[in-house]
Image: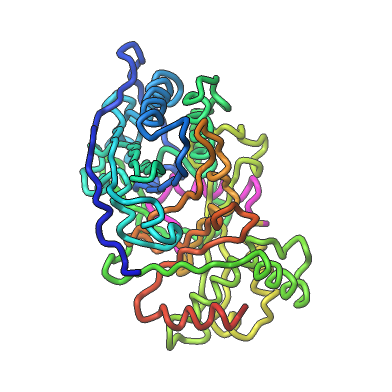
Amino acid sequence: MAALRDLRVSILRSSILRPPENVERRLIFLSNIDQQLDFNVETIHFFLPNLEFPPDAVAKRLESAMEELLASSYDFLAGRLSWDESEARWELDCNGAGVGFVEAASELTLAELGDLELPNPVLSQLAAGKADAMDIEDRPLFVIRLTAFKCGAFAMGISNSHATFDGVGFRTFMENLAALAAAKPLALPPCNDRRLLAARSPPRVVFPHPELFKLKEVQLGTEQPPTLMETSPESIGFKCFRLSTEQISALKSRARADGSPPSAATGFNVVAAHLWRCKALAGGDVDPDKTSTVLYAVDIRERLRPPLPRSFAGNAVLSAYGGMTHRELREEPFGRVVEVVREGSARMDEDYVRSAIDWGQLYKGFPRGDVLISSWWRLGLDEVEFSWGKALCCVPLPDPHRDIAVLFPASGGAGQGMRALVPLPAGAIPRFERLFYDFL
């Protein structure tokens, strides 16, 4: 079947939802982790038809639920990012500017879209819009768009500033949205105290942090810092690879056979090691003694003492890292690569986390590595139960500006394996694909 180029979508209604006038305007502190994430994340959540909940009824429930959320502890979603020149940092201005809510309809059926999990630029027509093209201080922090298909199925496209949530915080938000849409109380009220991740005074950086790239020392009143991990859109393409549960089990067995302990040979660690090795070696003629660095996001909620509340709404993720030369990645046993990945997570204790946060207080910069991985695999977005059912699948829209591989569950949930959405230069795709299957 020829690739779709137009979903034939029409906008039915577009509105701005705002908190009630009696909600007090305030400024919310953003941590040094939040500071690095001033870009939008777009996800599409597909739902099968439900005769009791046609798309227009779903839209009314979602709109009502969003208005309730904005009247409570999610009022910050209606705010805007604001640059504080005196402190040289971003903050959240809860100014009630509003979130976007859009209803749309497609002339196609859901089946006509084909494989929903493959990176397809046409799916961007189900997203909220071109918010990243706006000036950052005018950009909505949250937009939701419901698109109905001719068959009765529908897609919920969400665009949100990464400064508002990490993956766990977004999952909590979705559970609360589902609860209010079902006329139930909040499933888990969010904790909005982002000062729990404030830097110490004075900052104490006690580790070298090779995973972080220092641009320059922060001077108060200077220009805004660059956005995290931007790359040229012309240089990056995306390829989606599926790993079955059997293939993941085979990678675990190989790692253990190479001497990796069972505690190290987790599903994530073996997949991350596999992708790291393939992407590093797919680059063509590279100095074999050059070091390749893998970075991946680690949830730090349980690593602090005391732990952060499970409901913490801000970004509570830092980049763990591992480094090996290209020669080592090619010649060392797979179990050793897995062990290097594990070591990255293992070093992320209270002392290391606080040192990394303090590093962000002293320097403008962001995570640095040539292979970056973000895992939605076990996040459970497809397990959130709405009145009209769980999502058939939840997929990230690839961002050509960011060289980040995203892992997400295959249709049917994490138990059915996973997909890896991998950004690659066009010339490296054939080499990566060959290595991906040769190393399995």
- Highlighted magenta segment, given as a residue range: 346-368
The residue located at (33%, 37%) in the rendering is 143
Identified at 29% across, 28% down, the residue is 98
Find residue 1 and report its image quarter.
Answer: bottom left
- The structure residue drawn at horizontal position 72% and vertical position 65%, both measured from the top left corner, is 265
Q: Is residue 414 above or below residue 62?
A: below
- Is residue 161 visible in the rendered image? The answer is no
Image quadrant assignment for residue 13: top left
Q: Evaluate whether residue 431 shows in this view.
A: yes
Compared to 388, does 382 lie above or below? below
* Viewer-side residue, 10 vs 372: 10
Please say whether residue 278 is one of the residues in the magenta stretch: no
State the image coordinates of residue 104 (x, y, percent, origin top left): 28, 39
Q: Residue 404's spot in the image, x, y percent? A: 43, 61
The dominant secondary structure in magenta is helix
Q: Position of residue 299 (x, y in %)?
A: 58, 47
